[in-house]
Each structure stands twice: as structure tokens, then as C-alpha cells.
Image (tube, grey):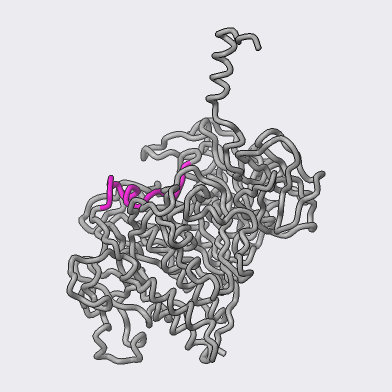
Amino acid sequence: MPALPLASLALVLVVAALPSRAAEPLRLLHLQRCGDLLANTAQEFCLSAQGLQNGALTVMLGGAPLPAEALQRDGQRLRLRLEPGAYQSAPIWLEQQGNASNPVWMSLHGSHVLAAGPNDVAKNMDGLTTYINLVSLIIEENADGLSTARQLAKKYGAEVVGAIAPLNTYQLRLPASNLLERDALVLRLGTEVNVDAVVIEESSAEESEGRDDDLAAGKQAPEEKPSGDEWAANRFLDAVNYYQRRIPSVHKPVPTTPIRVGVIERNVDFDTADFHDYLGSAPREDGKPNTRVYARDANKPDGHGTTVAGILAARWDQGGNTGFLRGLDGAGPGFEVIVERNSDAGITANIAASVNLVEDGVRVLNWSWGIHRVGAKNIQGDEVDSLVRSGLAMNGYEELLEEFFLWLRAKHPDVIVVNSAGNGSSYSGADEYRLPSSFITDQLFVVGGHQRSERQDVAVNDPAYVVKRSSSNSDMRVDITAAACAHASTVQADAAGDAHCGTSYATPMVTGVIAAVLSINPDLHPEQVRMLLRRSAMTIGEEFDFEPADAEDLTAPILPSERNYDLNNKDVGRSARLDMQKALDLAVKSRDRVR
């Protein structure tokens, strides 16, 4: 065989050194509605994948393959066209050459809004990034929303490009090239007879609303180092052990109901040890119902979405995180955890995703996000300097959130939203300061964060076992506190992830317990679930006799009615700390009372 020329040999070596496409795992990275979002005909979805090879490809929707004519492929990009009425919302994944991708939830409900591109944003007077030409109109409920939006679009030379139809909210692309032009159009639109409010979006193009909470609070690292037993403060393992033993009891088993949980986050890293076995249909070997996770794939094992979802669903005994609902597999009904954010269009997209998920049967929504108004003060009197929005944006968000909760109450009164209190060392319940936690509704639960104290000589039910994290927002609007620190997922099995702390991570602890409670007794209404959590709660902090003392109230104080009307109970007047095991026990006992 003749020797290769040096140039050819170098080329061969370079090609050999290049990473092989075959080495990439098969993953779904993006899935969004595309085409005409308002069309009454077929729905179109655009997908972006990784690791696709040449040759036959199967797209599975709800466990059944889609017909080849519904699919167009261009390299690693796919476009699906689904005929109306032929399909229902379901997980979608790819299968090729014996490999399966991560499943992503595909909602066939029509709420979707567009995110701005990098050339369509600008800095406003507060130094915040804001959308130039995309706004959303909340139309008065007695008006036909789409017709009104189209009439206004025609009047102002705009175009209707997105919608959250159940909230009578429609997104317009304005003929504006700068903020002066946008603000003039917003002012005129806001005075139209059938327009209730105009929502402007303040977030960078492709910005995540869910960053590490301590970083979002303007800190470079957690202000206190977490201990190794943070979740013991909420009796995490006791709760898993109780569910595994009590629910399938031979003498008196408790029937369970499948519960679907929605997590408003961008994505999850399926290359981690915590999530790598959730690919495809992810059946359990013994055939029993098991936890399922549907999410776009991420490339960061310690990302916000991966950590939040991991507290609910991470695989056990592999290092990194440990999922509460995953720990109930074998005894439970099989929980579905849907990680979905609709698009990168900020708060408006969060609401659009929430509406779709509720219409898809989600019973519990996890909102590990929130925003403060510019000028909000913390308990030291200093201004909160991150995750802030202008007064103009906050006014629109407040109206949008109000419409969402009014819709929930009217159409889906059994749905519960669990929201983080925030990490600005501020007040969670002041509506001029923070959203969404300041809303007063039975369907919104607000969660603060605590951390293990330095006291090693006290029992777990002692109020001194934990202390409030100094960054956690607090006040009477907070319903309960939970452990604020968790470990991030890792790619390597049996490796310990870095600690992440904040109310973002306390929130899914409460979400998981509520999902488990509802699996035991699905007839419980939101106000009953809140009462159950408060009655089962342990305590934290000093006793303040119902009066705030230097802003040290961590949650609404425990009332005598939450302790069997015992005015002398030692818990009365103290703040509430999640007790996961006792909450499950009360849920079992509630079955006979509710029915």
C-alpha cells in the first residue's frame, strides 16, 4: 500500500480527532409551536435535536409513532404538523437505532407567546432590558378577545402573534423600533375601550427567570454553609418510609390517584446520574407505576431547572440529588413531572405555560420564581438589587396574574400553585414589592426557606433545630418554610454535587408533599391542603404573640384552630415549618373525614 502524502495524512488525523456525531447522545433540546399560532387548522411544532443519525427515525407521541407524512426533517431539526382533533397532549420523544431521547411534554392547547430576539430589546430608564416591539393586551372579559386584538392590530399597524386565550390575552408585534415609539403605542393601546391592561416584558432575550436564588439575590455564594442533614429538618426520609409502608399495607391499603405536577423551568440535564434513566418511555422493571419526567435537555448538570426538578424526581443512590416523588415509586400511583416554560418570553411565557399545563390536567404547579418592584426595600432598609422590574412592567404583570388566578378559581378550583417567597431579605406579601407571592388566594401557597442551626443538642421538632436563611423573604403571607439547600445533580454517578440554596429549592419540597397528599386524597380542596400542612407543621423561630417584631415573623403564626383550638399549645404564635411525614399521616386520616 503506497504511503499517504503528508497533507493527506494530516487530514486523516484531523478527521479522526473530530468528535463523532455517533458519540452524542440522542436528545431533544427545543420544542416550540411555530407557523401560525392562531390558526384553527393543523398545529405545527418545531423541534431541535442532538445526536440524530442518517436513516430511519421514529417520533413517538404518547407512546405511539407519528406517521411519516407528519414529519419534515432538516438535519438535526424537525417540523411536525398535527391535524386538529387527531391527537391529545402527551410526551413526545425520538427513537433511532435502538436509542431513545428524553421525552418532552407537547401541549396541544393553544397558549403561546413569542420571545424577543437580541435585536428587539433595549435598556429602559431603570437600566433594565425590555422588549421593544412585543406587548400583550389583556382584553376585557365581556369582549371577544381575538376579534378585538385583530381590530386593534389593524388600527395601529401591528400584528397578532401570540395568545393566552383562556385569559383573553393576546400578544401583538408593534411597528416600533425604539422605546419612545413603543411607549407611545402602549399609552394609546391602554386607553382603548376594551383593553384592560397592556403587559410589557422586561427580560433579556433568552434570559432565564430561574437562576440560582442566592445569586439572584445579589450574593456570590450562600451566606451560610449548609449541613449534610438539611432535609432531616422536614422529616424527608421519614415521609418516604411512611408512604412506602402505609400506602400498600396488607391489612388496610390506601388506594392512590396519579397526580400530574407542572414545574415552570426551562430544562433538565438528562446526562446526569439523577435523570439518565428517564429516557423514552422509561418503564419500571417490575411493571409498577413509576415517576416520569418530561423536559427539554440541558447541558448543565447544576442548572436551576435540573436542581428544582431533582428535588422532586432525581434517581436515588446515585449521588447528586434525591427526588421525593421518585422515592415513592413502587407504592405510589406514578407521578408525572412536566418541566415546561412555553418560550423564553419572561413572566408572560410562565403564565402561558401554566395555563396549558392546567388544561392538560396538572394538579400542582411549582413556581420557583418571582420578581420585585424597582425600589423594593429589604428588612435592613436597603434596596433589593436583582430580579427587579419597573413599575410599568409590574402593573402589567399584576393584571396578568390576577386574570390567571381568577381563571383558576372559576375553571380549575382544585389546582394549587406553590411559589417561592423570594431571596431579597424583603417582604413576600407586599404587593407593591413582590409578585406573585403577594397575591391572596386559597390556590397560592408561599414557601420560605430555613437552614439547619448550629444547635446540635436539640430534637428535630424543636424550634431551634433550624433558623431562617437571612436572604429568605418573610412575613405573614408566607404559609410555611422548608429546607432551602439541596445538592446539584452530577454527571458522574456517586459524586456529590455542589450545594444550591434559596427558596427556589424549598418550594419543590412543599410541591412534592402536596402531590403525595393529593395522591392519597384527591378530594382535598386547596384550603384544606393548606390547613393540613399547617396543622402538621413543626415550628421555627421565636413566639411573637401574633405581632411582628422587627420584621422577624417568618410565616403567618400558627393559630389555635390549627392546634385543636388549644390556646395554651406551645406552637401557637410561632412560625410554621414543613413536616412531611405528619402531613402524609393527616392525609390518610382525612380520607374518611372528607368522604
The picture places residue 537, in percent across and down from the top left corner, at 35, 78
Vertical position of residue 445 compared to residue 535: above or below: above
Kindly tell me whether residue 392 is visible in this rendering: no
Comparing 57 with 18, the one in front is 18
Comparing 440 with 588, the one in front is 588
Does 214 sit left or right of 56 as displayed?
Answer: left
Instruction: Report which quarter residue 330 is drawn in.
Output: bottom right
Q: Which residue is at a point 38% across and 71% down the rendered structure image?
A: 236
Give the quarter of the figure containing the N terminus. top right
The magenta segment is 207-222
Q: Which residue is at a point 27% across and 76% down the rendered structure image?
A: 460
Q: How many marks?
A: 0
Vertical position of residue 83 compared to residue 285: above or below: above
Q: Which residue is at a point 22% across and 80% down the rendered structure image?
A: 545
Q: Is residue 328 magenta?
A: no
Vertical position of residue 411 compared to residue 160: above or below: below
Does 455 sit left or right of 107 as displayed?
Answer: left
The picture places residue 531, in percent across and down from the top left corner, at 42, 81
Instruction: Report which quarter residue 461 is drawn in.
Output: bottom left
Dominant SS type (magenta): loop
Instruction: Report which quarter residue 363 is drawn in.
Output: bottom right
The picture places residue 595, in percent across and down from the top left corner, at 57, 90
The picture places residue 109, in percent across and down from the top left corner, at 68, 57
Does 250 sit left or right of 222 as displayed?
Answer: right
